[in-house]
Image: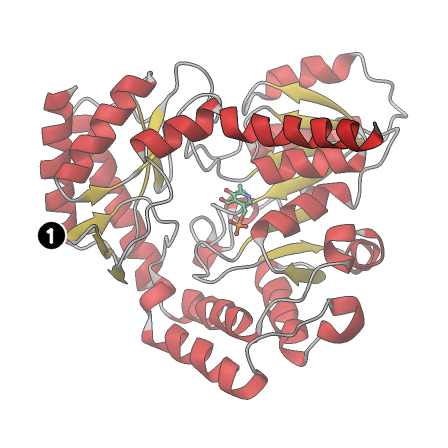
């Protein structure tokens, strides 16, 4: 009897996977999980065809920089391939501390903690500091890793309209002053390309006594002096308690970071499950991020080129009458409004040798189904011309 019950409940889960509509559609139309056969900068090969990558987060184009590649290879020769342990036990190395100090100094923060993924770092940046009885105020469009952090914290949550200080003010109206509060936002929203309205949001947070967490995965390397990010862009470093982000975008590596005061970072090291029970960042990934950080400071041409390309690209899309959701950054969506149009546009770009990524509801708000594109400093003028030709073709297919 017991055995039959167990078999039945196990079967329910297997049947759920078997019947999953989203998986069936994904396998039928194959829009995701494309495995490229080769890559060299912005050039990729997919299904034997040469293409231009137009959806990578390699904003500064450092993933093929010779100094970065050399640092990555050298670290493996010196330290081996992996730490095979968590920082708290056997996984800490001198290179972790060196990178943390370098990042903290660059960002003008007292302390930093790095981990194996931006997802882990940003999730822990919320989950470590909020707890049951607190209230988290979250921008509706924040990344999944921040929602996971919110859920894990067990705090109550109130959402406010995307990047809307007035709505945050309204939401805060009914909240008792003595409730511990946390404001969670992104510096640059990865799908929309919007820059956070930090001056207004930080002022409201200040008035209400909110602890502030800002995930700048897409602003770090892109905004501010030498790419110091959104907080530096607005010169509001003292208004953000926790500044976190990813090393898999402008730093051309993998991994993530959380920065704040020494006290906050040591609290995180004691209390964050994601920090305590996950193996430390590998030598090569840390060395890659460290070399990229040096280049961000010594070679300003990459940031300049990124913004030059961004301006050119945005003008191109505007000229074609495309809706870019008022993106202000190198992350540029092309909003088409329905999954059918998105699929047709994406396929037309692919036919013309330009690789992009589709994002459809519920990943984006209803009616905002879009193609996510991102410009890199590595795109050449010739790349941009080819992209223009492909976009013109795709517009005619709509
Ligand atoms: C806003 C934001 N935070 C965190 C992450 C996670 O970073 P990673 O991919 O390095 O784990 C992403 C990744 O896309 C992101 O867009």
State the image coordinates of residue 371 (x, y, percent, origin top left). Answer: 32, 31
> Which scheme is used to colour this image of the protein?
secondary structure
- The quarter of the displayed image where residue 82 is located: bottom right
The residue shown at (45%, 30%) is: 23
Q: What residue sits right under mark 1 in the picture?
A: 382
In the rendered structure, the answer to whether residue 298 lies left or right of residue 103 reads left
The residue shown at (47%, 45%) is: 218
Pick out the residue farthest to the bottom: 78
In the rendered structure, the answer to whether residue 288 lies left or right of residue 113 reads left
The residue shown at (62%, 41%) is: 214
236, above or below 113, in the image:
above
- The quarter of the displayed image where residue 134 is located: top right
Q: Is mark 1 within 8 Å of ligand 1?
A: no
In the rendered picture of this protein, how many numbered marks are placed on residues?
A: 1
Q: Is residue 177 visible?
A: yes
Quadrant in which the N terminus is drawn: top right
State the image coordinates of residue 302 (x, y, percent, origin top left). Answer: 32, 60
State the image coordinates of residue 113 (x, y, percent, origin top left). Answer: 69, 61
Q: Secondary structure at mark 1?
A: helix
38 or 356: nearer the eye?
A: 38
Quadrant in which the C terminus is drawn: top left
37, above or below 290, in the image:
above
Dot 1, how many residues are within 10 Å of its Cα: few (below 14), some (14-19), or many (20+)?
A: few
168 or 86: nearer the eye?
A: 86
Q: Is residue 333 visible?
A: no
Pick out the residue farthest to the front: 1
In the rendered structure, the answer to whether residue 387 lies left or right of residue 149 reads left
């Amino acid at each position: 009897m017991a055995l039959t019950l167990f078999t039945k409940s196990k079967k329910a889960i297997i049947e759920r996977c078997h019947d999953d509509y989203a998986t069936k559609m994904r396998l039928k139309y194959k829009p995701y999980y494309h495995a490229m056969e080769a890559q060299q900068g912005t050039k990729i090969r997919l299904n034997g065809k040469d293409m231009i990558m137009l959806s990578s987060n390699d904003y500064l184009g450092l993933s093929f920089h010779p100094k970065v590649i050399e640092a990555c290879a050298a670290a493996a020769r010196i330290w081996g391939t992996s730490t095979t342990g968590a920082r708290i036990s056997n996984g800490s190395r001198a290179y972790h501390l060196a990178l943390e100090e370098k990042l903290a100094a660059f960002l003008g923060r007292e302390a930093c903690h790095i981990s194996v993924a931006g997802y882990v770092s940003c999730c822990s940046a919320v989950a470590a500091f909020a707890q049951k009885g607190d209230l988290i105020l979250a921008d509706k469009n924040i990344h999944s890793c921040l929602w996971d952090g919110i859920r894990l914290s067990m705090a109550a949550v109130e959402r406010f309209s995307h990047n809307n200080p007035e709505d945050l003010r309204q939401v805060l109206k009914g909240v008792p002053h003595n409730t511990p509060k946390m404001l969670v936002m992104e510096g640059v929203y990865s799908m929309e390309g919007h820059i956070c309205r930090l001056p207004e949001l930080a002022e409201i947070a200040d008035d209400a006594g909110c602890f502030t967490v800002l995930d700048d995965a897409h602003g770090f390397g892109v905004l501010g002096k030498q790419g110091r990010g959104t907080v530096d862009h607005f010169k509001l470093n003292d208004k953000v308690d926790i500044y976190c982000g990813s090393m898999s975008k402008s730093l051309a590596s993998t991994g993530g970071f959380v920065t704040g005061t020494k006290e906050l970072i040591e609290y995180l090291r004691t209390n964050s499950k994601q920090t305590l029970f996950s193996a430390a960042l590998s030598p090569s990934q840390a060395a890659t991020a460290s070399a990229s950080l040096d280049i961000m400071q010594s070679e300003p041409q990459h940031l300049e080129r990124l913004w030059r390309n961004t301006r050119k690209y945005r003008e191109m899309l505007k000229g074609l009458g495309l809706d870019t959701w008022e993106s202000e950054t190198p992350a540029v969506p092309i909003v088409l409004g329905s999954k059918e149009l998105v699929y047709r546009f994406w396929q037309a770009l692919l036919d013309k040798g330009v690789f992009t990524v589709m994002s459809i509801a519920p990943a984006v708000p209803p009616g905002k189904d879009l193609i996510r594109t991102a410009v890199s400093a590595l795109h050449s003028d010739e790349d941009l011309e080819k992209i223009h030709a492909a976009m013109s073709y795709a517009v005619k297919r709509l």
